[in-house]
Image (cartoon, rainbow, N blue to C red):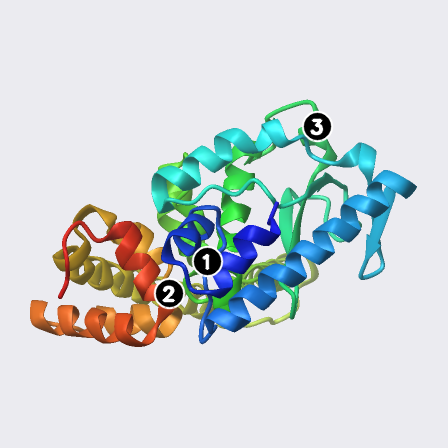
Amino acid sequence: MLDKKTLKSAATGDLETLANLDSRGFIMGEKESLGDFVKRLNCLKKNMEEMNKSLKAEGFFEIEGSRFSLDSQIPSKLFKTPAQKTEELYRFSIDWVPGFFVNPSFGWLFGGCAFYFFPDFFALFIIRKSFQNKERWLIYSRDELLAHELCHIARIGMKKRKFEEYFAYQTSSSSFRKAVGSVFQTAGDTYLILLSTMLLLGAQISKVFIGLPVPVWLFWIFVFLCISRLALRYRKIKKTISSATENLKKTFENNTLPVLFRCTEKEIDALSKMLKKDSVTNWVNNKMQNSIKWKIIKKRFSKRSVE
């Protein structure tokens, strides 16, 4: 996965090596120095080797109290189509993340998710066992689910959630999910909507069938406020992404989405507020003077010098 020669070359700051790592989904994170980045990769290499050793010797490995077996590991061939999607959108292709078919105990509607383990950034997938023999289950598509989680893995170093779902949902084949999927950023958002609607239903039942003098209109207001909160947050995210994208076009032309994917939350917010072409150019130049990540971005995505 990561050989000693590559890691040694990366530690010296070799841009060719770092650009290649970036293309494989090893993207530098927020406030991550070159030393921190290489340390992360070394930790990841060690953990992956230990996992593979355990799988080979014991037939399983355990992490954070969970056990994953060799016979439930996702075949590498199933990552081919999802990796093509992330390459098309964001110019990275991950072939190193382990994945397993698992039916967790925390949700019968569960399709899949990615687990991250800090501070060494070890990551793995789990997807429902139903996907072992078929590409779809209920509303879920196996390829779409894997591509979605690959985006989260690639941006693991950003450590923020504000734009994560927006980027991940752009891999969807559904125009509807692509447009509004990022409304729900956390499980808490989903539970909030479910709670508000269940309370409304309970109030309606209590009034109609039990005859209690329940002010149902208050529950309607609560539902409206919950939905409005998520809708307004989503609108702000879309507006920020749109403005930042437009500003990046002045420097990176057709590579704006891959570049934006590699930006931190603060960088995206800053880009969205710039009004003049010179401001963007100066901002990018300043970043490249102080950030190895932006030197990698320039090498991979700038069609012309921004000097």
Q: Which residue is mark 1?
A: 27
Residue 50, image x, y percentages: 79, 52
Q: Which residue is mark 2?
A: 293
Q: Amino acid at mark 2?
A: Lys
Q: Are marks 2 and 3 in contact (CB under 8 Å)?
A: no
Residue at 23%, 63% in the rendered image = 244
Residue 130, image x, y percentages: 71, 30
Cα separation between marks 2 and 3: 38 Å
Please identify the quarter of the rendering in which residue 141 is found: top right
Q: Nearer the viewer, residue 185 or 269?
A: 269
Residue lying at the far top of the rendered structure: 133
Secondary structure beneath disc 1? loop
Q: Which residue is mark 3?
A: 132
Residue at 36%, 37% in the rendered image = 88
Q: Amino acid at mark 1?
A: Ile
Residue lying at the far right of the rendered structure: 58
